[in-house]
């Protein structure tokens, strides 16, 4: 039997689409391998959000082209739509797949029947973005807006849960732009009479309304107490240059309301440091702002030049060394935020699903790792007692202690 190897870069949407690709190859009687040197075909599902993502892909492509088994190499994903990167010139022998229907039939209608690992499944409900944040290449490579029809979303969730998945992660390029409204979709999802929970991968501030908050508040069994709300900067001047549609005051007001109603919720965010024109004053504003918000953790990105974006034309570029220093400052704040959040959870009982051989993930985004009779958290050490199965694939743990590694 011929073998294939698939390597996924980037977001949860790519992870979902890689699973579709994987299922197509299996239906064509290919066997999946975790060793590229054994593969007859290697598929790279790419990301082009940052220059680092491009460099990482190039590194793996070079390695693949030098394999002694000389596999066929196929490249798909966002980078193939980035007209500023000539991959074919760098790697003339690889096959570029711009039309994903060559890899899986009718991608917008295809259903995932199962994922390779664990008890969490990603479900793409939306694709495309037209926000045109000044730093972002995504609207140029995924511009077409699409939403999976509601009846198909509900049907796919039922199939996944019946296949053994306990957590469904709703994903999209701009999830909050789901046609018909994300809150209305959630309202339908929580009525499915099966034992599972749903997690929302990311949502913009302007798309969180009172109904959305109330749904999370009143459905603790079905909706995870975790929201990822991108901030990007704590400086109003930089937010304006980024073409973000809110001020720090608006952000603070909305998330304060969320945390007042949902005090046990894990609030996570994205922060970009070193944006063109960002001064030390702007950086300090960001540091001061994120300190006052009850974040559980940050995803920190160093600004990455992307040709064609509006920000690529801005002057006053921040030196790389300074970007690294500023990122370090924010990482230090992030470390404190993570510890504070974990400490706040000592003595609480949480519902968790399995994410690995000895790992669980709580509804409020705490990873616990089993060590003998306890569960330990990866960031620091979080001990939790108890693992009684409450419903299919969902466990209850009591967090009893936390300490630094």
Image: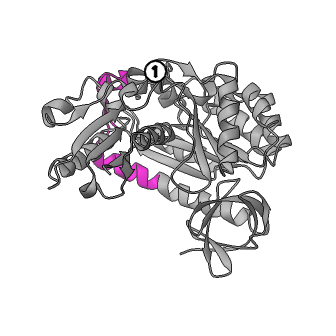
Say if the magenta span includes residue 313: yes
Residue 380 in sight: yes
The secondary structure type at the circle numbered 1 is loop
The one of 105 and 271 positioned closer to us in this rendering: 105
The answer to whether residue 140 is left or right of residue 256 is left
Quarter occupied by residue 84: top left
Q: Residue at 61% x, 50% y: name it.
A: 120
Say above or below: 316 vs 161: above
The answer to whether residue 17 is left or right of residue 349 is left
Which segment did they paint magenta?
Answer: 304-329
Say which residue label 1 marks: 132
Q: Residues within 10 Å of mark 1 (few under 14, many from 20)?
A: some
| Residue 355, image x, y percentages | 59, 59
Q: Residue at 43% x, 43% y: name it.
A: 22
Identity of the residue furthest to the bottom in this view: 372
| Residue 119, image x, y percentages | 62, 54
The one of 298 and 49 positioned closer to us in this rendering: 49
Say if the magenta span includes residue 327: yes
| Residue 113, image x, y percentages | 57, 41
């Amino acid at each position: 039997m011929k073998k294939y190897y698939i390597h996924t870069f980037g977001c949860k949407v790519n992870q979902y689409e890689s699973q579709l690709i994987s299922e197509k190859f299996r239906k064509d009687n290919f066997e999946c391998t975790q060793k590229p040197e054994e593969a007859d075909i290697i598929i790279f599902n790419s990301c082009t959000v940052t220059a680092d993502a491009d460099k990482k892909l190039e590194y793996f492509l070079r390695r693949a082209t030098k394999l002694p088994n000389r596999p066929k190499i196929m490249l798909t994903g966002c980078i193939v739509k980035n007209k500023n990167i000539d991959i074919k010139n760098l790697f003339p022998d690889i096959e570029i797949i711009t039309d994903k229907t060559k890899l899986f039939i009718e991608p917008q209608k295809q259903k995932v029947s199962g994922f390779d690992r664990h008890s969490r499944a990603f479900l793409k409900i939306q694709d495309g973005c037209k926000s045109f944040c000044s730093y972002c290449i995504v609207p140029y490579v995924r511009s077409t807006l699409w939403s999976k029809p509601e009846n198909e979303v509900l049907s796919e969730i039922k199939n996944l849960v019946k296949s053994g998945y306990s957590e469904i992660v709703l994903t999209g390029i701009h999830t909050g732009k789901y046609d018909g409204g994300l809150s209305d979709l959630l309202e339908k999802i929580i009525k499915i009479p099966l034992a599972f929970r749903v997690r929302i991968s990311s949502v913009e501030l302007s798309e969180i309304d009172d109904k959305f908050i109330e749904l999370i508040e009143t459905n603790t069994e079905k909706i995870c107490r975790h929201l990822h709300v991108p901030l990007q900067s704590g400086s109003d001047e930089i937010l304006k240059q980024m073409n973000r549609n809110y001020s720090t005051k608006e952000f603070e007001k909305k998330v304060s309301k969320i945390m007042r109603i949902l005090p046990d919720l894990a609030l996570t965010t994205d922060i970009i440091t070193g944006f063109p024109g960002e001064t030390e004053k702007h950086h300090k504003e960001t540091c001061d702002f994120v300190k006052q918000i009850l974040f559980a953790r940050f995803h920190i990105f160093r600004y990455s030049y992307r040709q064609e974006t509006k920000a690529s034309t801005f002057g006053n570029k921040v030196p790389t060394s300074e970007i690294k220093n500023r990122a370090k400052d924010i990482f230090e704040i992030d470390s404190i935020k993570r510890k504070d959040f974990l400490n706040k959870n000592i003595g609480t009982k949480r519902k968790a699903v399995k994410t690995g051989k000895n790992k669980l993930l709580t509804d409020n985004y705490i990873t616990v790792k089993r060590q003998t009779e306890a569960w330990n958290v990866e960031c620091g050490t979080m001990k939790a007692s108890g693992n009684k199965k409450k419903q299919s694939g969902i466990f209850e743990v009591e967090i009893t202690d936390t300490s630094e590694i």
